[in-house]
């Protein structure tokens, strides 16, 4: 069976890319002649221990940035491919979410990446900016106008008309909104899934933005336009799982209730958070 050369732009994990490239080398005619193996490739890449490369593939060790040129040369990566591979490595190993988001942005904005994934930049922005989702829901309001200035004012002027224009264009590109025969936007039933490492960085950012908006709403919105409540209580790990399950179930039930056909008047954000206020170190538990 012929195995095609892996394309780095199709990966969200540098380890998965390395694994597939090793399989490609082992399956190629030259690789079979030379007896390509994880051990041999690791040695030829210049790792001090022949076992180190295997541990990197298994996720037990990290590929240090200084070794990236070795990998690039060995796999014959061009400049653009090397940049993408480097950003995958740095995104994986970054400690701060803001750093991970930075490297994810670098990948998404690559011309070569966009040629292969023409919609992913728009998808990334959809999950990165709170107002994309808000605008998508705002089109269902009876008073909605296809006017970026009006939309900007409806969103408390927190978004410029220029950004609104871009958002409308990309929401239409993703088919989240469409225009009817009269030229009026409407919300489609399309759902965009976020599930990989690249989008994980953007969804973290939007959660933070929306939590910050909840903080500002405490003083910025009258009580009749917001509801904020919470409870502080001790829980076991089992109870935590049960609590998360109950919240998820309630969220589904609430969405079902709010999907009933009734004229909407504004767009609201409903947040659910459960997080620890303490961390007690117990004997035998990892740090």
Image (cartoon, rainbow, N blue to C red):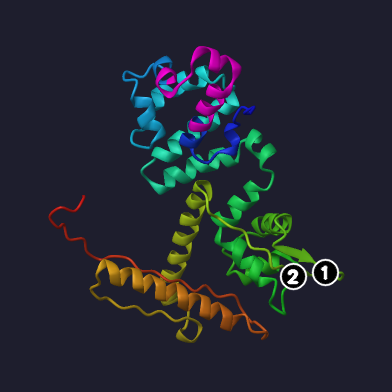
Identity of the residue drawn at 53% across and 51% down: 199
Query: How many marks can you see?
Result: 2
Question: Which residue, given by chain and number where applicable, does mark 2 sit on?
Answer: 186
71 is within the stretch colored magenta = no
Q: Position of residue 154 (x, y in %)?
A: 63, 72
Question: Which residue, given by chain and number where applicable, does mark 1 sit on?
Answer: 180
Closer to us: 145 or 83: 83
Above or below, 256 relative to 15: below
Identity of the residue drawn at 80% across and 70% down: 184
Closer to us: 77 or 98: 77
Residue closest to the far right: 181
Above or below, 179 relative to 250: above
Q: Are marks 2 and 1 in contact (CB under 8 Å)?
A: yes
Dot 2 alpha-carbon crowd within 10 angstroms: few under 14, some 14 to 19, many 20 or more: some
Closer to us: 191 or 96: 191
Q: State the SS at label 1.
A: loop
Which region is colored magenta? 19-41
Residue closest to the far left: 283
Identity of the residue drawn at 48% across and 35% down: 14
Q: Quadrant of residue 159?
A: bottom right
30 is within the stretch colored magenta = yes
Above or below, 4 relative to 232: above
Figure quadrant of the N terminus? top right
Examine the residues drawn in magenta and state their main secondary structure. helix
Q: Position of residue 46 (x, y in %)?
A: 39, 16
Q: Is residue 236 left or right of residue 135?
A: left
């Amino acid at each position: 069976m012929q195995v095609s050369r892996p394309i780095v732009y199709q990966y969200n994990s540098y380890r998965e890319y390395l694994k597939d490239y090793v399989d490609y080398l082992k399956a190629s005619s030259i690789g079979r002649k030379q007896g390509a193996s994880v051990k041999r490739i690791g040695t030829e890449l210049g790792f001090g221990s022949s076992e180190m490369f295997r541990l990197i593939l298994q996720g037990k060790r990290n590929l240090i940035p200084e070794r990236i040129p070795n990998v690039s040369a060995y796999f014959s990566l061009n400049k653009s491919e090397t940049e993408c591979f480097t950003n995958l490595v740095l995104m994986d190993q970054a400690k701060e979410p803001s750093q991970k988001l930075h490297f994810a942005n670098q990948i998404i904005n690559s011309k070569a990446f966009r040629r292969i994934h023409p919609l992913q930049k728009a998808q990334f922005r959809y999950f990165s900016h709170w107002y994309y989702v808000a605008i998508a829901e705002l089109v269902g309001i009876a008073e909605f106008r296809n006017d970026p200035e009006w939309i900007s004012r409806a969103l408390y002027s927190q978004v410029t008309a220029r950004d609104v224009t871009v958002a409308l264009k990309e929401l239409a590109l993703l088919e989240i909104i469409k225009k009817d025969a009269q030229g009026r936007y409407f919300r489609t039933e399309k759902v965009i899934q976020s599930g990989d490492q690249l989008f994980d960085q953007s969804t973290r950012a939007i959660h933070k933005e929306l939590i910050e908006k909840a903080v500002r709403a405490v003083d910025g919105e009258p009580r009749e336009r917001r509801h904020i409540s919470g409870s502080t209580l001790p829980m076991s790990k089992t109870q935590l799982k049960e609590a998360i399950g109950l919240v998820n179930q309630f969220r589904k039930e609430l969405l079902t209730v709010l999907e009933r056909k009734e004229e909407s008047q504004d767009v609201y954000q409903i947040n659910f958070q459960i997080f620890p206020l303490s961390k007690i170190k117990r004997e035998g538990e990892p740090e």
